[in-house]
Image (tube, rainbow, N blue to C red):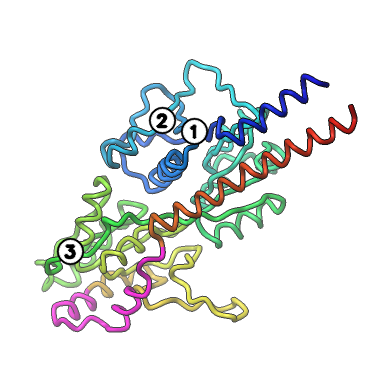
Amino acid sequence: MKDKQTDIIKLIENLESKNFGFYFFTLDTKGNPVASIANIYEHVKVLTKLGYNAFILHEKNDYHGVGEWLDESYAKLPHISIEGQNLNLSTSDFIVIPEIFSNVMDQVKGFPCKKIVLSQSYHYILELLGLGKRWDTDYGFKDVITTSEEQAEYVKELFPLVKTKVIPVSVPDYFKPTDKIKKPIISIVTREQNDALRIVKSFYLQNPIFKWVTFRELRGLSKEQFAKTLGESCLAVWVDDIAGFGTFPVEAMECETPVIGKIPNIVPEWMKVQDDGDGSEIMLKDNGIWTNNVLSIPSLISKFMQTWVEDSVSEVLIKGIEDSKGQYTTEKQEKIIKDVYEAYVLDRRTELESVLEKDLKEA
């Protein structure tokens, strides 16, 4: 009994002195830019800055990394490979696993560490999850971090007993408007590449007068080149039905580049007017040109380009974009990351102190 008490005291001391680890399981994108992976790196970077031992945990030794599309400070963050070694996590450690990897959750369910799901896309929650399986009761993942209140509500519908916390994404300050005149460039980002091709081909077929307009698909660019191109563009087009947060339109707004977008399945909070209604009808903000019909996008582009050429873009749209800027800064995200993870550490310490107190009473 005394040895057990000594072990618990040591674990509590580890939590108090930050002598423990946060391990973030991360997919190898083989050098391809992925917003959700960038966000994981942001969490690790902030926690490292706060003095915690935070690690990118990956499966193979030949992990490609993010050095080709994020700056050097992210590539230099601590990385640990699972391959060829036994991952030994203690009760004072934390492991954070993306929602899609329920198979990994199953593999670590016996670990004594604190287990957290990072759910950035509701669409992938059920992808590898066995029929009738639950994160909490089957794998021991009772806490979930997600990027929006809407996703948090969906998670609660699936797993009523889990506790959710929301950490929105952030937009780096290099997403900003060009200091020159915008170019006749339309930046386009779609979940499926074929959607972009259909929109572009339809637009040119329907509007041969606009053959001088250039479309640029931003897939595959480094983050800073992505921001530069978006800042120079006169218009952005976005189609992503299963978006969990919708980072691209928010980035475009910071660049003062109007967005024409397909309304996703879960309407993000930055797109909705918050009111006191009964929720039966969702009111959308005027911070973009939103549609339920992807087939209407080419004609919406045409109408916008006519106003842009005539320098008569809607003042309502311009004001809506301006009002939406500055909501998701890195400073705001850092503060939320700090508060959320500090709360997890405090909760873990409280749990251990309760166990210690019970043991002392029974001794």
The reply to whether callout 3 and callout 1 are in contact (CB within 8 Å) is: no
Residue displayed at 38% across by 45% down: 38
Q: Quadrant of the N terminus?
A: top right
Circles 2 and 1 in contact, beta carbons < 8 Å: yes
The kind of residue tagged 1 is Asn
- Residue drawn at the location 77% of the way across and 19% of the way down: 3
| Residue kind at label 2, given as amino acid type | Pro
Closer to the chain start, of discs 3 and 2, is 2
The percent coordinates of residue 90 (x first, y second) are 63, 26
Q: Which residues are magenta?
A: 302-327
* Residue that numbered label 1 is attached to: 53
Q: Which residue is mark 3?
A: 178
CA separation in Å, label 2 and label 1: 9 Å
Residue at image position (30%, 63%) is 252
Question: Measured along the vertical axis of the image, is residue 64 above or below residue 224?
Answer: above
The kind of residue on which mark 3 rests is Thr
**Mark 2 vs 1, N-terminal side:** 1
Q: Position of residue 120 (x, y in %)?
A: 49, 50
Secondary structure type for disc 3: loop
In the picture, the quarter occupied by the C terminus is top right
Q: Position of 358 compared to 181: left or right?
A: right
Graded by Cα atoms within 10 Å as few (under 14), some (14 to 19) or many (20 or more), the crowding at tag 1 reads some
Disc 3 from disc 2: Cα separation? 34 Å
